[in-house]
Image: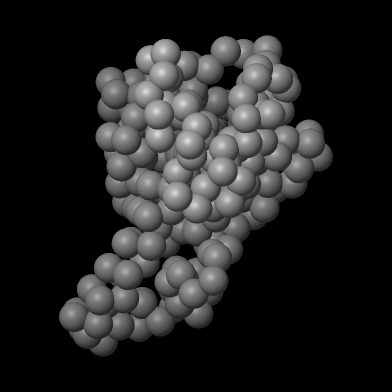
């Protein structure tokens, strides 16, 4: 690499080529960004699948090229936490097999937090009528990494836990999925400026 005019210029990272044709301001701001979909799973009757599927479909219909990391539809051999896997862990707890319960969920948590780490931003479904544990942990993890955390508050912003207003941006709290989707659409079209929490590197890389 060569230091030039206050920033690193080519000669690229080992094994990675920078696609400089995309470094100009243009529409499709969110193309190829990674978004992690946080939200209740353990106590959700449908394992939290329905809203995630619906949200991804709405983004696709808008033509926004966001790539999603969905804990209810994991990549490869990442540890599962819905359906049979969730029932398996409940069985471990019923039988007081605490070490096995720890070992399994430690793997799940590790894999989920790694996905949060890889993401460019997070969308979190917050429902005060469903006990949430992992979701809040993931939100804190994302916030500590200074990532944007967009929250869809079930029942509207006025239902949001008061503590969230202390540490999260109320302008990123939305009353519905549709409101959040439209906000992302406005960003994608360049109609809403993004701040320095949005560090979108992946779109410039040719892997």
Is residue 24 visible in the rendered image? The answer is: yes
Determine which quarter of the picture holds residue 2.
Answer: top left
* Residue at 70% from the left image edge and 20% from the top image edge: 26
In the image: residue 184, left or right of residue 138 = right
* Residue at 72% from the left image edge and 35% from the top image edge: 64
* Residue at 73% from the left image edge and 22% from the top image edge: 27
Q: Position of residue 186 (x, y in %)?
A: 68, 19
- For the N terminus, the image quarter is top left
Count of numbered circles in the view = 0
Q: Is residue 171 above or below residue 53?
A: above
Q: Is residue 35 above or below residue 76?
A: above
In the image: residue 58, left or right of residue 206 = right
Q: Position of residue 185 (x, y in %)?
A: 70, 26
* Residue at 55% from the left image edge and 55% from the top image edge: 70
Query: Of residues 121 and 162, which is closer to you in this image?
Result: 121
Determine which quarter of the picture holds residue 184.
Answer: top right
Q: Position of residue 106 (x, y in %)?
A: 27, 68
Query: Of residues 153 and 143, which is closer to you in this image?
Result: 143
Determine which quarter of the picture holds residue 101.
Answer: bottom left
Query: Of residues 22 and 55, which is closer to you in this image?
Result: 22
Query: Of residues 99 and 32, which is closer to you in this image?
Result: 32
Q: Is residue 163 above or below residue 50?
A: above
Colour setup of the view: one colour
In the image: residue 61, left or right of residue 139 = right
Is residue 125 visible in the rendered image? The answer is: no
Q: Position of residue 153 (x, y in %)?
A: 50, 32
């Amino acid at each position: 690499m060569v230091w030039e005019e206050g920033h690193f210029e080519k000669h690229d990272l080992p094994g990675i080529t920078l696609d400089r044709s995309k470094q100009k301001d243009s529409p499709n701001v969110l193309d190829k960004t990674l978004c992690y979909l946080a939200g209740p799973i353990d106590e959700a009757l449908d394992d939290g699948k329905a809203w995630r599927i619906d949200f991804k479909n709405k983004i696709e219909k808008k033509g926004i090229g966001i790539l999603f990391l969905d804990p209810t539809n994991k990549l490869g051999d990442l540890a599962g936490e819905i359906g049979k896997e969730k029932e398996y862990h409940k069985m471990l707890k019923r039988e007081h097999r605490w070490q096995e319960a720890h070992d399994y969920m430690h793997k799940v948590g590790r894999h989920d937090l790694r996905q949060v780490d890889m993401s460019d931003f997070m969308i979190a479904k917050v429902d005060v009528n469903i006990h949430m544990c992992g979701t809040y942990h993931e939100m804190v993890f994302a916030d500590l990494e200074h990532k944007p955390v967009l929250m869809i508050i079930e029942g509207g912003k006025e239902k949001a836990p008061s503590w969230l207003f202390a540490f999260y941006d109320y302008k990123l709290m939305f009353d519905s999925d549709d409101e959040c989707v439209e906000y992302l659409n406005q960003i994608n079209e360049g109609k809403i400026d993004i701040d320095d929490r949005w560090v979108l590197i992946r779109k410039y890389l040719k892997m």
